[in-house]
Amino acid sequence: MQELLSSFVAVADEVGRLQRGKDAECRTFQAFCESGHYGGRTEPTDTRQGIYVVTPTGKFLASINTHSATKVAEMLRSSLARWSELPERDRTLGEQEAEDLQASKRFEDRYPSDGLVLVEYMRDLGRPADDKDWRTRAWNTDQVWFTAAEAASLVPAQREVGAKIAVPARLVERLARFHLIDSVRGQTPPMSREAVIEASLQSEVTGVSGDDVLLQFAGRTRTEVESRPVENAEAGTKGRGVATELRGRARWNAKTSRFDAFELLAMGTRWGATQYNERQRDLGPTAIGYAFVLAAPDHPRVAPSCWWDYDLR
Amino acid sequence: MLRFVMVMCCVLRAISAQGLDDAAFARDLAAIVPHDGELDWRAIPWQSQLRTALVEASRVRKPVLLWAMNGHPLCQT
């Protein structure tokens, strides 16, 4: 498979924006996805998710939506056969086409290179894994973005041991509403402002050494909302929520105004179900854990899953 | 990525924040972050934006393999 893949430029992307956006990148996708496996489909959803092979100009070659590696490999080979028959003009973009694509607007253009980017991981805790049930082994991930000014606001102005601040409420609410939600088994909608019952995080200086300021974090979150009944859910599901205790540690470099180490844990309980989070028969409450770690330099620069509600300042 | 996380864990253990049980913290962190076998799909050099992949494919004269999902496959699906 790896050898086969070397014949392609591989890219992963979010399909919702590609389906509905107006820019050149989205228009390119919209032009070829209707030739694929879900072309024209409206029920049960109008999603065009799947695996596609196209030319750089967006000419459709093949597509499939399957978990079968064998079927994907077959599709890739058939697409290469079609590719080999194409004239050279179909294999390259014109200068203007390339410029138009690059000018497409994405939230990733606001990636806070000079701020703080955390990779989030979440999974169920304290439950046995069953090899026959993917849901028992599920985990999910996301990214949390803070601008440089927001990152600096996590650090007490007074650089001495024992100095404490409450992290700005809107930043803790960002965690609670968009990241401390139950997406372990699949995406779930963000929480509204009204759903935030509690969101507090304290930052305390625990050490100072030269330019290094050592911090620890402690806090709590609780979000809770009445929700619509979910299809196939067990009786009694009227709401969903997550309650966590936060604890963490970090190192701030006062010279560079950057964090060079950061770990935050949020552990607690989740309950309820949403349309796509596969909790219809697992309403809880059950234990859930979230870990936030500093993004490695080569980590993919992908927008947070709830980017449309993000309020970067 | 996992190596980076492990290095950062060592760095932060060295910080030894007061009031934080380092052993418990490290144990809880390890219970949540994915381990080696759960990140095999990252061996494929996925690009993360269709626009840049199309331009790159044009440059290297290759077709584009796009994995498009509800929720970004490299982030949250």
Image (cartoon, coloured by chain):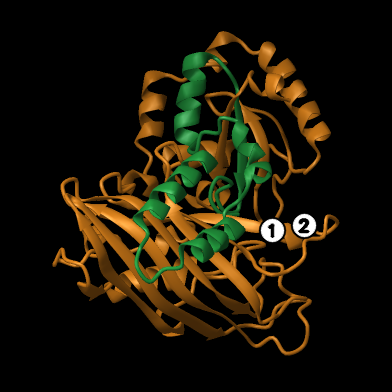
Chain colours: A orange, B green
Residue nearest the viewer, comparing A16 with A38: A16
Residue designated by label 2: A134
Answer few, some or many: residues within 10 Å of disc 2's Cα (few below 14, many 20 plus, some between 14 and 19): few
Residue A121 in percent (x, y) is at: 54, 57
Q: Quadrant of the C terminus of chain A?
A: bottom left
Q: Which amino acid type is shown beneath numbered disc 1?
A: Ala
Residue A241 in the figure: left or right of residue B55: right
Kindly identify which chain the residue marked by label 2 belongs to. Answer: A
Real-space CA distance between mark 1 and mark 2, rounded to the nearest whole angstrom: 6 Å
Q: Quadrant of the N terminus of chain A?
A: top right
Mark seen at residue B12: none
Is residue A235 placed above or below A261 in the rendered structure? Answer: below
Residue A132 in percent (x, y) is at: 86, 56
For label 2, the SS is: helix
Question: Residue A194 lies in what quarter of the image?
Answer: bottom left
Residue A10 in the figure: left or right of residue A310: right
Mark seen at residue A138: 1
Residue A89 in percent (x, y) is at: 53, 12
Residue A118 seen from this side: no
User: Residue lying furthest right in this view?
Assistant: A132
Instruction: Evaluate if marks 1 and 2 touch, with contact meaning CB atoms under 8 Å apart.
Output: yes
Residue pictured at 54% horizontal, 70% vertical: A181
Residue pictured at 60% horizontal, 77% vertical: A270
Kindly identify which chain the residue marked by label 1 belongs to. Answer: A
Is residue A137 placed above or below A275 in the rendered structure? Answer: above
Residue pictured at 30% horizontal, 48% vertical: A112
